[in-house]
Amino acid sequence: MPKVKVDGVEIEVPAGATVLQACELAGKEIPRFCYHERLSIAGNCRMCLVEVKPGPPKPQASCALPANEGQEIRTDSEMVKKAREGVMEFLLINHPLDCPICDQGGECDLQDQSMAYGRGGSRYHEAKRAVTEKNMGPLIKTVMTRCIHCTRCVRFSEEIAGVDEIGALYRGESTQITTYLEQAAKHELSANVIDLCPVGALTSRPYAFEARPWELKKTLSIDVSDALGANTRIDSRGREVLRVVPRTNDDVNEEWLADRARFLVDGLVHRRLDRPWLRHEGKLQAASWGEVLSALAKINPGSSVAVIAGDLVDCETMFAAKKLASALGSGLLEGRQTGLAYDTSNLAAVAFNTTLAGIEEADAVLIYGSQIRDEAPLLNVRLRKAVKRGAKVFIIGPSWDPTYAATHLGDDASVIDNLPEDVAAVFAAAAKPAIIIGGGALAKGGLASGLAFSARFNLVREGWSGFNVLHFAAARMGGLMLGYAQKGGIGDIVAAQPKVVISLGADEVDWTKFANSMIVHIGHHGDKAAHAADVILPGAAFTEKDGTYVNTEGRVQYAEKAVFAPGEAREDWSILRALADAFGVSVGFDSFEELRAAMVAEVPALGVEALAHYGDLPAAPEGQRASGVIAYPVKDRFLTNAIGRASPTLQRCSAELIHGEIQAEAAE
Amino acid sequence: MADRHPEPVTPELVARWGSFAWTAENAEKAKEIVARYPAGRQRSAVMPLLDLAQRQVGAEENTQGWLPMPVMEYVARYLDMPIIRVLEVATFYTMYNIQPVGRFHVQVCGTTPCMLRGSDDILSACYARGLKKGHTTKDGLFTLTEVECMGNCSSAPMVQINDDNYEDLTADRLNFVLDELAAGRQPKAGTQEPGRHTVEPVGGPTSLTAMVTENHDYRGEW
């Protein structure tokens, strides 16, 4: 632990720290462009110059200089001030002064740092360099003249995404950042370079010229496009959500966000259900809330009611619906819309027990029936890190490119019970072995085989739990904690032939099986369930209500309401409360606070913003084993939910990046 | 330099070079080059292999050789590395021609020492013969490029033509060299100054003269 002096204050820094990190520990701000905590050190912007003794009598780049015992670092000397002014002046030589028309304006590192560390004016009178715009696909807009060649985007695509899409061509002043032959960046995390870019060279194409950062209301939220529960910030203006950006949470998403989660927001203003609808003689007709509720009051379902929860709903909505169903005398609750029917009697057996941060330490991982890049892009980043540390990865299921070295063992779910000897030897010798069971394997009875695998290789040991199930729906773990699971899955609900089925945004259900039921759909998008519904009650999307979400690890997280639901749409819990009145039963809450209190009273884990504890893993059931060829649930990674399917941006991504259609760019 | 960019990938280009593969002889060389690096570090061989590929292209079309995109893709596949990393290398170094060149690639050094010693005359002589920067003459013989320092300052001005340097040039000497090349003969490479062998001082040393015949110790005289 070397001791260094920063501006005369002695501090102790961790071994291996850089001078820049030492300065930060001492509370000194060091300006930087190319340095980023999660990327390798490049040392090419030179903005982080400081004076270091002992050493050459010149300023040194602190990001690439190891902190050593006895160093005297100055960040406030005249030399450092002059050096920073000089670097800034060089950077601005070729940077256009187009801040008024630049989307980065107001949240630009170059702007901020030139204010703080730059000279007052420019001495440069010669011509500036201009660089042609590069195509990087439907998500990333480029204005390459603004590029200062920090190469953060290049390092991100190589190190984090693992696809080497972006490179720096040519040299010196002619350097240009581009993709090969200007092909679209295809990686599912590629839009993170928008956040990484310290200037306005790479900006968000769908968000172009929409707003200035200081106009936006910032609301803390949780991503619902997959089951990882990435922490996000929703930026809204008035009643419209303009963008979603990631928040840093080292336990969940670090500081990345999947493209799907970032760009689904423009789906929030398309295909919305903003008024109630009633089916009259086979046709949906617009109605008022009064008409709909009085129509519902006339039907007397008795206890023949079922609730099917969709993938995007929060725990409060599911709990309110559960209360309504139980007040009516029904316990028919299900959230696994596509027919999965794995055993949920022990939630430890269906959670991601290793935790997302923990999986980085695994040294042998079996991915069992999961296309992780589609189902949980941010988990793949963690697995890449594990592989870099030496982990061996094996995949059972149809082959896909994980961006790291992995051995493909076969497509059939039963492979896990007859592992090749060399693979078994790897897991037997591993100190921290892990399995990740995806939806593809769960559908083939993979849970039993997974538990048997866990028992065989002792995945749960002192200080390590290597048994993981990776869900895909944001609502899944919360739903399971609230009892949204029948023994036979959704098949039990079909068999019960309920008079009324309440759909909580359940857009993935095969509704043809409920032809004899009255379908009451509480949802926010005119998607699949709305087409089948007899009554449509317009609800709120995840941005329009407070809510509790539980990610696949069992991590309870709260999202806040950013904007109001459009038109006559209401928050889901209040709709369910009104339904209770219409059906003439009492659910025991009159406000959101009462609802949340009742929910926490019933499931205390939902009241604590932390990992829920599910106890020990059960033993593998006797005689049940997986069989059948695995099929991955996600067919199109952009159009996975109702909001995404309504989003023009994601539709375009799907057409261009997945189906290879070329859409002509309108003349700009 | 500013307008240096790879030849666009057209269907014709792909048709011509899409099936590029090492010749038997170059395949041997490539294997030997890759073997110089530790296993798993084969991408370190990208620079010599790009050079080898450029020479093979040159041999095929009787030019100095250049790197069409399909050939770079072949090298990328051969080394199991992303094509963008190959392209980065190929565009960084001017040694790699990323656009077609003629039989002789005349690279005139125009950096300060050469300029002081008359590189402007050399360039003018090139222009007078119909060469144009960044272009190949109609007969496909000469491509002219102005380059930065080639490290021959003590025998400036100089040009580099394919693998050889021609130094101590004047307009006449350059014309002689180009005429010889055009006629299919190989002029003497290196300095063109009569009586000079390499970059030794012209007319004998002007300093440290006592060192010519013996290992003289100057220290007492300082």
Image: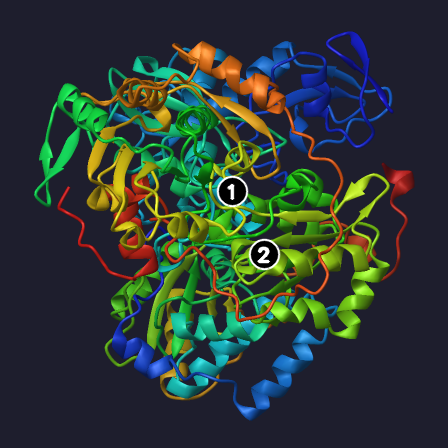
Q: Nearer the viewer, residue A202 or A352?
A: A352
Q: Quadrant of the C terminus of chain B?
A: top right
**Residue A156 appears at what percent x and percent y?**
53, 44
**Residue B211 appears at what percent x and percent y?**
82, 56
Can you say whether A410 is above or below A260 in the image?
below
Are the residues flagged by discs 1 and 2 from a single subunit?
A: no
Q: Nearer the viewer, residue A667 or B135?
A: A667
**Residue A458 appears at what percent x and percent y?**
82, 53
Cα–Cα span, label 1 and label 2: 85 Å
Q: Choose top left, top right, bottom left or bottom right for residue A643.
A: top left
Q: Callout 1, which amino acid?
A: Ala
Q: Left of A72 or right of it: where is A539? A: left
Among all residues in the image, which is located at the extreme top?
A8
Q: Which residue is mark 2?
A: B154
Q: Left of A459 or right of it: where is A38? A: left
- Under circle 2, the secondary element is helix
Q: Label 1: how many residues lie within 10 Å, few (<14), some (14-19) or many (20+)?
A: many
Q: Callout 2, which amino acid?
A: Ser
What colour-coding does the image apply? Answer: rainbow
Chain designation of label 1: A
Q: Label 2: how many residues lie within 10 Å, few (<14), some (14-19) or many (20+)?
A: some
Can you say whether A260 is above or below A594 in the image?
below
Q: Is residue A155 visible?
A: yes
**Residue B129 appears at what percent x and percent y?**
27, 71
Among all residues in the image, which is located at the extreme bottom?
B24
Q: Nearer the viewer, residue B219 or A72?
A: A72
Q: Nearer the viewer, residue A172 or A44?
A: A44
Chain designation of label 2: B
- Under circle 1, the secondary element is loop
Q: Residue at x 74, y 50 (%)?
A: A389
Q: Residue at x 64, y 50 (%)?
A: A383
Q: Which residue is mark 1?
A: A485
